[in-house]
Image (cartoon, grey):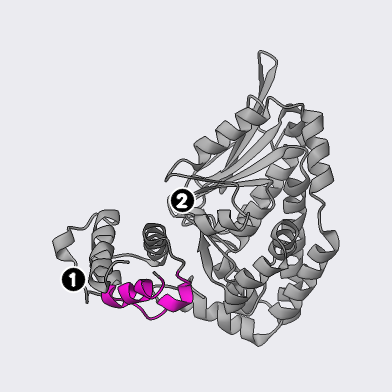
Amino acid sequence: METAKDSNVHGGSAEFHSATSAESALSWKLVDGVIELALHRGPCNELGSASLEELEKFATALQLMQDEAHSLIIYSELEPGFCAGADLRELYRRSETMDKAEAVKGVRDFLERMHRVLNLIDAAPLTTIAAVHGVTFGGGFELALACDLIIADKMARFCFPELRLGLIPGFGGIPRLKRDLGNGVVRDLLLTGRSINASKAQQIGLASQIVGEGEALRAARATAAQLRKFDHATAVAAKKFIKPIPHEELRREIDIFCELFARPAVQLGLRKFVESTDAQPYLP
Amino acid sequence: MPTAEQTLDEILTLAAAHFKVPREKLAPDDDFFKTLGIDSLQTLDLLTKLENHFHVELPDYELQGVSDFRTLAGKIQARL
């Protein structure tokens, strides 16, 4: 089996874990009913083609593992944060080296593949927990939003900085944030591009728990241990009832992103970011 | 409410502790990027530390162009 490289059974409890290498962007393991997906591509888990391929492998493995699991925890092993979002340098190279139509087609393909992975995580018959710290920006924020619960280290920050590039979030962030928190919160974060801290995130209902520095994964594991006590079929039914996937809006988001990506302003915005020597390139 | 000078002093103390720089090395008009040797992601850490400490929200765009502790303190003081 290529995607869940090793499988052992210990005392009736299956254990899977991914193969890892120094270059891998992520790795996962299933132990005692909890799947843990660790992100570890420097500098801050930027999501590009290589990461997407690994996420797709994880998505395939997830479908194999989910009968053995009740929870999924996603976390980062890197100090700067959970995930800084899409790999803008790769996006810039793509836009520069291809003709416009080819670049837009490539971006659409990338987004559709990313949406398939995130929709699968969103609807997985498991309780999914994003244990976040530090930078949780753009695509990283969108990955967290695909999860059922967000447990935030008190140093976590959330942001949709895409408008400064002339784009909107493309990994499903707007429909998911609207689904979970409403249009007003989306407008604030999307249209101002400001980042918010964990306290604000909890105040608006985005983060379910705030924990001390370095404690998010521990708290997520404690939550997963609690979830194990519940009847799994009931938890799955409850999730399916309360968390519909906003398919129509997600499709529309890809269309709008691609329309915007075709404009010269985006190329300029990406170049400005890539070539920036500003001490605050992430700030809107 | 703390005075502007108290706010400035607390910021210097917090920054020194968080980035492990001797407090006496930091002065109000220092360029904190240079003095602390911090990058953009670490700047966000500093912002979060300050927001948590002072219980304020400070939108990132209000900090654009701000690079010294005194101006930073003024931005925070305005939200206390």
* One can see residue A18 in this view: no
Residue A201 lies, in percent from the top left, at: 56, 57
Q: Residue furthest front?
A: B1
Give the residues drawn in magenta, as a range. Answer: B58-79
- Compared with A38, A177 (above or below) is below
Q: Nearer the viewer, residue B5 or A145?
A: B5
**Residue for point 37% across, 58% down:** B53
Callout 1 amino acid = Ala
Residue A154, disc: 2
**Residue for point 72% across, 52% down:** A118
Give how far apart the Cα atoms at labels 2 and 1 are.
Answer: 28 Å
A281 left or right, relative to A161: left
Q: Picture quarter containing residue B35?
A: bottom left
Q: Residue furthest top?
A: A11
Callout 2 amino acid = Lys
Indicate whether residue B54 is drawn in magenta.
no
Task: Indicate the chain on which mark 2 is placed.
Answer: A
- Compared with A127, A208 (above or below) is below
**Residue for point 43% across, 44% down:** A212
Q: Nearer the viewer, residue A158 or A86?
A: A158
Q: Provide the residue designation for mark 1.
A: B27
